[in-house]
Amino acid sequence: MKCDHCNNEAKVILDNSNNLCMDCYNKILSEEYGCECFNEFTREIVISEPDGTIHTFEIEQMLLGKYTYWRAYEEGGYEFALRVDTESNQKVAVKRLHQKILKGISAKSMQIGQSQPGQISNAVYRGNLEYNLNETGLLRIEDDADGKIYIYMDGIKLTGEEFLKMLTVYNGFNMEWRFLDIADDVDMPLKLSITKDRMEEYWQKFESMIMRFAEHGSFVSYKRSADLSEEIFEYLDILEELIRHGNGEDAVELGERIINRLKGLETDDDCFPIYEIESVERILER
């Protein structure tokens, strides 16, 4: 089905008569509600995991009047969403969605290993890989046109029978559960799977951020310190997640490198980077 306005793929039927693609739908809604139509975002992003697994996400925005709904999904795998106020900064919303994707991919609900001779009765197999259920995790439930139920976990599609089989590893245990809207933030104690190489990538990301604002990599003018500070606090969300759910020792080492780098900066700002250093230290104390 094609869009009535631009001939792209239609994804929305408005007033039971207009077949619209998402861009045309958002343009019509923005005119109706008198708000800006935001189109400055990448429609597709590709993310590579440390083991070489590639994830390609389609990014969609849908205006819902007071709220704007952001969705990132890959065919037959991961899906993430975000709901924000329409009047808020949508560039920040896109950044938050990207961070949610990275966090979601890093937080694994299953242990993955090479399959060995003789299959384990409560494991699931895909090719030569063996999947076992972690103590905590996150999953998405969907059904098809025939009513068959599927579970999506770590971007992998499982049948209901396969998931029930995996649960038997905890035979005799009690289980508690909680349902969340896909757009809600997840604060479950998921274990982040972070390699040494990925930790170094996080450091390089911080270093690149400093270099963009610091003259010769060492001096931060008071004219630029506020912008740098804002980006530092966005970055510290990653450090906090690593401290809470990742490898604690590696995360502390990363935090200490950040502190030393900030202490080594010269500046003519009376406040920067005192508060930023104190914020990192508070995170490391948790």
Image (cartoon, rainbow, N blue to C red):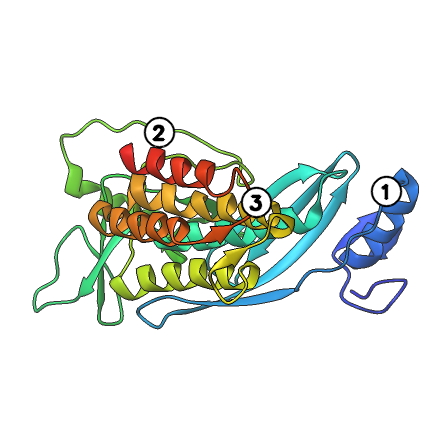
Give residue 215's quadrant in the image.
bottom right
Comparing labels 2 and 1, the label whose residue is closer to the camera? 1
* Kind of residue at badge 1: Cys
Amino acid at the residue labelled 2: Trp
For residue 213, above or below residue 167: below
Q: Secondary structure at mark 3?
A: helix
Tell me which numbered mark, 2 or 3, is placed earlier along the sequence.
Answer: 2
Q: Helix, strand or loop at disc 2?
A: loop
Among numbered discs 3 and 1, the one appearing first in the sequence: 1
Q: Quadrant of the C terminus?
A: top left
Residue contact at pointers 3 and 1, CB within 8 angstroms: no
Label 3, residues with CA under 10 Å away: few <14, some 14-19, many ≥20 = few
The one of 86 and 72 positioned closer to us in this rendering? 86
Question: Pointer 3: what residue?
Answer: 230
Could you tell me residue 212's position as x and y percent? 55, 63
Identify the residue position indicated by label 1 in the image: 35
Q: Give x and y (percent) for residue 206.
A: 44, 57
